[in-house]
Image (cartoon, rainbow, N blue to C red):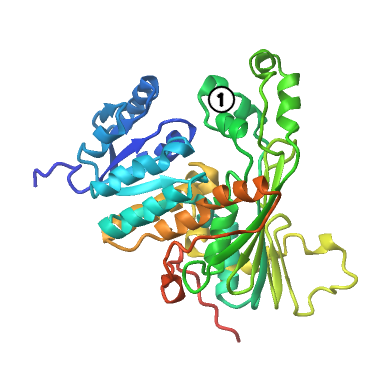
């Protein structure tokens, strides 16, 4: 009695309050197990707008600062890092050194050294670290993983994933919005955003838990799409028309795994197209394809010689009742509306409960660095004329015996 209602809630601090930070805030504000107590961004107007959202939600005004160290030191239980890519590691390291649980947003890194710093810091401090790869929590990836865990697709040989998202306006618009992609596309040529497609695949293939990435080869097309887009748009032409962009329109990457699987990744963000992640899982018994919502098995249902490809469209729906995880079966329309079709809500709810219960993080520091480093390695490969580049083993050999966490409890389907 008389206990402050905030006392038993996890106190959350946000560093980075741009588009992604505000999207995550939407899901945190509706969670009655947590409360936002601190906000940080280098732009004060963003901090003020975010603080207004907190008070409008009926919560006390949070601590406001432009200094991420002050936020970490303010008494928060969890720091969510949603800055531009280049500052993720800087904030995460400081929080871990202070023993404050860190949730780091996704993005690649150009520095293998930064990856080792994260690993070394985690191993020294044991501060809980979560990588906020929301696509691991999406309904399609959940179903595909459940099919694999239940042996429906057999022994997996090949996976592919895309990040296909027409972003020319967002990239060029960075000249006004401070979006970090403008600098990235000017200075680099690489697979700059690998984790949406690679994260779920890595979980399926048990990367860092009995398997690991061994090597990659990357290739980049010419950089033409963004240049032509800017030339067509008055508000960008005068200020960006003379800029040279290094980032190729389409970057393709092949990864070899120790257990023999191969992975194909595609980054396609500056040519007109519809959004697509293109997850494909190919095994000895069957095939899952996200784009066509298809599951094709070697079970006689389809004639693999004569059936038209489109006949398999939406056949994955036949597997939802038995194989989909409970959270996606029971998700509400309100939860779906809170960002990225509901996967942000599910991810954050599961993360906060893992923190509260002292459970291992479902996407840990070893997952994070193994996926993020594809950016640095692809940049090296492209610069070397698409030469083979080897992955570091961030587990220092422990991947052979360690277990990796699944992000869901997948149903166990007993065959008749």
Position of 157 with respect to 105 (left or right) is right
Image point (35%, 25%), residue name: 47
- How many other residues sit within 10 Å of disc 1, few (<14), some (14-19) or many (≥20)? some
Looking at the image, residue 296 lies above or below residue 356: below
Asked if residue 279 can be seen in this view, the reply is no
Visible in this render: residue 200?
yes
Is residue 30 positioned above or below 141 on the image? above
x and y percentages locating residue 344 in the rendered image: 47, 47
| 90 horizontally vs 304: left or right | left
The image shows a total of numbered marks equal to 1
Q: Quadrant of the C terminus?
A: bottom right
Q: Quadrant of residue 129?
A: bottom left
Q: Residue under circle 1?
A: 174
Name the spot of residue 296 as percent of width and height, x first: 74, 70
Along the viewing direction, whichever of 85 and 408 lies nearer the viewer: 85
Q: Nearer the viewer, residue 404 or 85?
A: 85
């Amino acid at each position: 009695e008389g206990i402050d209602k905030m006392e038993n809630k996890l106190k959350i601090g946000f560093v980075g309050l741009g588009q992604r930070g505000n999207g995550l805030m939407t899901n945190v504000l509706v969670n009655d197990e947590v409360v936002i107590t601190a906000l940080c961004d280098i732009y004060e107007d963003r901090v003020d707008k975010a603080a207004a959202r907190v008070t409008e939600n009926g919560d006390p005004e949070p601590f406001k600062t432009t200094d991420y160290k002050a936020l970490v030191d303010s008494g928060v239980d969890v720091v969510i890092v949603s800055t531009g890519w280049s500052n993720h590691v800087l904030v995460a390291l400081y929080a871990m050194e202070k023993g404050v649980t860190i949730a780091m947003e996704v993005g690649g890194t150009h520095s293998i050294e930064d990856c080792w710093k994260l690993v070394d810091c985690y191993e020294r401090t044991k501060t809980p670290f979560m990588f906020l790869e929301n696509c691991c929590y999406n309904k399609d990836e959940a179903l595909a993983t459940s099919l694999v865990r239940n042996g429906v697709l057999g022994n997996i040989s090949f996976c592919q994933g895309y990040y296909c998202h027409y972003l020319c306006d967002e990239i060029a618009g960075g000249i006004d919005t401070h979006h970090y992609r403008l600098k990235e596309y000017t200075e680099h040529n690489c697979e700059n955003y690998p984790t949406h497609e690679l994260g779920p695949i890595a979980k399926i293939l048990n990367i860092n838990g009995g398997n690991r990435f061994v090597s990659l080869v990357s290739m980049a097309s010419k950089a033409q799409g963004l240049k032509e887009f800017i030339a067509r748009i008055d508000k960008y032409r005068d200020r960006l028309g003379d800029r040279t962009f290094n980032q190729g329109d389409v970057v393709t990457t092949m990864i070899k795994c120790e257990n023999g699987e191969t992975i194909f990744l595609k980054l396609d963000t500056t040519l007109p197209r519809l959004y697509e992640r293109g997850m494909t899982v190919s095994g000895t018994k069957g095939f899952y394809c996200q784009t066509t919502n298809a599951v094709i098995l070697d079970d006689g249902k389809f004639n693999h010689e004569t059936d038209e490809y489109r006949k398999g469209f939406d056949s994955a729906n036949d597997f939802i009742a038995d194989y989909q995880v409970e959270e996606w079966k029971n998700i509400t329309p309100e939860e779906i509306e809170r960002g990225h079709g509901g996967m942000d809500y599910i991810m954050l709810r599961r993360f906060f409960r893992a923190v509260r219960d002292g459970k291992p993080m479902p996407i840990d520091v070893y997952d994070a660095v193994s996926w993020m480093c594809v950016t640095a390695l692809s940049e090296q490969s492209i610069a070397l004329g698409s030469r083979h580049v080897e992955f570091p083993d961030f587990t220092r050999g422990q991947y052979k015996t360690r277990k990796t966490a699944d992000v869901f409890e997948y149903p166990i389907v007993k065959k008749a």
